[in-house]
Image (cartoon, rainbow, N blue to C red):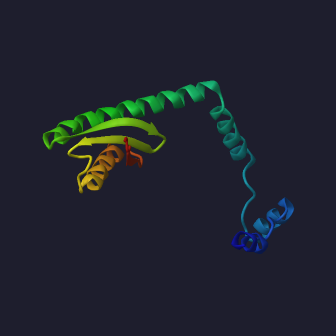
Amino acid sequence: MRDMQDDDTKSPAPPPAAAAAARRAAGQAAPDASALRDRFAKLAQADTPEAATDAAAAADDEVTRIRALIDEMRPTFRRDGGDIELVRVEGAKVIVHLSGACAGCMLAGQTLYGVQKRITDVLGRPFRVIPDIRH
């Protein structure tokens, strides 16, 4: 019911001519045609096989770096009777498996936050570290 109400209150987008007239009235210039061409050229390049290969290589490099960071932290986990293992990376989600003393620890959430912060700081973009629950 709520979705229907939201749809009823939305106004349709103005036609292109009306949008252009509104921009002129507000003193705004029309979009630069060369800038639009450049933007579309960049978008077209993103669909090339080379771009896909570059993106896959970058993702593989990122997974390798995440694995190395977790391996650096493992001695600390093991010293406390636990362990951490990288299960997989799905975009910005890093799924890890906690075992040993870490599996039932009340501070596991804080520990995962520390791992998340370290990965985010080193790689320069946000990640979410999520525990994998194996039965």
Q: Nearer the viewer, residue 10 or 44?
A: 10
Whole-percent x and y of residue 124? Answer: 38, 45
Residue 133, quarter of picture: top left
Query: Does 50 appear above or below 88?
Result: above
Q: Residue 99, position in %: x, y? A: 26, 41
Left/right placement of residue 104 relative to residue 62 reads: left
- In the depicted view, which residue is nearer to us: 80 or 31? 80
Residue 101 picture quarter: top left
Residue at image coords 59%, 29%: 51
Residue at image position (55%, 25%) is: 53
Q: What residue lies at 81% left-to-right and 62% top-to-bottom?
A: 20
Q: Does residue 10 sit above or below 115 in this rendering?
A: below
Furthest toward the front, the residue is 135
Quarter of the rendering occupied by the C terminus? top left
Q: Tell me residue 129's x, y (percent).
A: 37, 47
Q: Quadrant of the N terminus?
A: bottom right
Residue at 86% in and 61% down:
17
Foreground of the two, 55 or 14: 55
x and y, in percent, of residue 67 in the image: 33, 33
